[in-house]
Image (cartoon, rainbow, N blue to C red):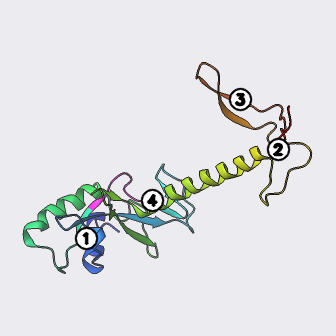
Amino acid sequence: PDQPIWRMFSEIVARLPVNYPRARDSSSKGRARLWKNIEHMQESSSGASRYGPWLLLCKSRFASFSASDESNIKPEDLDFFKNDWEEYGDHATVESIGLTDGSKLMFEYALLRKDGNFIWPREAAAKAGRLRRVADEDVAFRRLLRGVDDNDELIKGHSPLIGKLVDAMDSSGRWYQVEITAVDNIVEGSND
């Protein structure tokens, strides 16, 4: 329990080498961070980032690791990695960050994008999920504007648009948030 967190991180890197081409930059270094499973713990959140039952340890930080095809770290790189891991752990111990026997950890490594920057897979998935929800909401609203439901059937009676808040532009080009209070249905070919 009194082992420094950097030592545990180094053990993970040594025992579970990452040999994936997109996990390293041109200098064969990758980025990683640790997550703790809190599914069965009665623990208050200390403001750390959470994704489902996982809590990010050492928030807003990452540690570098050797992601080369070689199994051992070169002696000249050992000091760099040790200093980086100590900085990542911020002098915390295994016990001080709340790890006990039976704790589940996840080692997440970043992937290199085409533009040369790293991205965290969990954050990319969350961003894609948000974008998908916004797109789905947009499609549903456009259907309501056309006066059809999810099955492309005409909506009869009271319009579900009434009472919705939308962004609208006035004649001077300024945007306001407004509530829809009335809907006029215009039939093609009519003079109304």
Query: 38 left or right of 25?
Result: right
Residue 144 image offset from top left, x and y in percent:
76, 47
Dot 2 lies on which element?
loop
Crowd rating for badge 2 (residues with CA inside 10 Å; few <14, some 14–19, many 20+): some
Crowd rating for badge 3 (residues with CA inside 10 Å; few <14, some 14–19, many 20+): few
Residue 191 visible in the picture: yes
Please state, as top left, top right, bottom left or bottom right, where the C terminus lies in the image: top right
Q: Which residue is mark 3?
A: 178
Q: Which residue is mark 1?
A: 10
Q: Is residue 107 above or below residue 90?
A: below
* 3 or 1: tag closer to the N-terminus: 1
Please state the extent of the stretch shown in magenta in the rendering. Answer: 56-63
Q: Which residue is mark 4?
A: 124
Q: Residue furthest top?
A: 172
* 4 or 3: tag closer to the N-terminus: 4
Dot 3 lies on which element?
strand
